[in-house]
Amino acid sequence: MSVVEIRPGAIISRAFQIYRDQAGTLLGAALIIFAIQFLLALLLPRLAFIAGLAAFILSVFYGGMVVNLVRDVQDGRRDHSTGELFRSVTPVLFPLVGLAIVAGIGIAIGFVLIIIPGLILLTIWAVAAPVMVIEHPGVFAALGRSRDLVRGYGWPVFGTIVLAALVDLAVNIVAAVVASGLSDAATAVVNWVAATLTAPIFALTSASLYFALLAVKEHAVQTEPAAPSPFGDAPQRTI
């Protein structure tokens, strides 16, 4: 079995390969989720907190669905429907939300502390969400497991995050240019489309990173030379 290389270009290419192959499922699910967010923003303009909270939970839910989709792809089969992928996230939705809150607070505090600690936390916790979906640990165990997987590959993981962020930024800049001069309603629709197009990017990148790091770590364990026996080699009997 070939070992996946942990390089930003390779990980992003893998993420976009899955994006192309599974675009129907990814974009269809994103359209539904962000349509709900769009409607909440329209119907509850004075309750921005509730609409924002709902949008946050929906985004976390979508990210969990993407992880399960990538797991299907990694297994060489895509035999789960969109509904089944959504239902598979339900058991871990609340832990995922808790994880997102804890990680978000930690990273935000890190950015306040001269930015660098925030970037470090963003990197070492890059695959915490896939860990939660696939391995089902607790919130802090998922953060620790992510740190262990990233250990030794911090710079490539950070580079992958930056590359994904640049792609996301480019799409949103194009959306802002298109929306300039449009009515509020038209701008909201453009933002909805942009959110739908960019939603899979970070989720696919995180999931692809998780499976790549997992493969590399497992390969390292399998190829690690056995420790010498504390008793030495057994003596050879001669006749």
Image: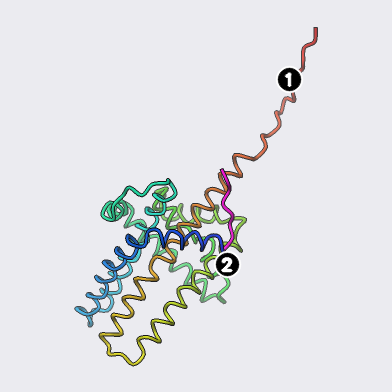
Badge 2: few (under 14), some or many (20 or more) residues near its Cα, within 10 Å?
A: some
Residue 54 figure quarter = bottom left
Residue under the point 56% across and 56% down: 150
Percent across and percent down for residue 77 are: 38, 47
Determine the residue located farthest toward the front in the rendered image.
21
Residue 1 figure quarter = top right
- Tag 2 residue: 159
Q: CA distance from mark 2 to mark 1?
A: 49 Å
Determine the residue located farthest toward the bottom in the rendered image.
181
Task: Give whichever of 234, 143 is nearer the camera.
Answer: 234
Determine the residue located farthest toward the top in the rendered image.
239
Determine the residue located farthest toward the right in the rendered image.
239
Stretch of the chain drawn in magenta: 1-8
- Residue type pointed to by label 2: Gly
Percent across and percent down for residue 88 are: 31, 51
Residue under the point 55% across and 60% down: 10
> Which quadrant would the C terminus be assigned to in this image?
top right
Secondary structure mainly formed by the magenta segment:
loop
For label 2, the SS is helix
User: Horizontally, is 35 left or right of 109 in the view?
Assistant: left
- Residue type pointed to by label 1: Ala
- Tag 1 residue: 234
Up-down relation of residue 206 to residue 117 (above or below): above
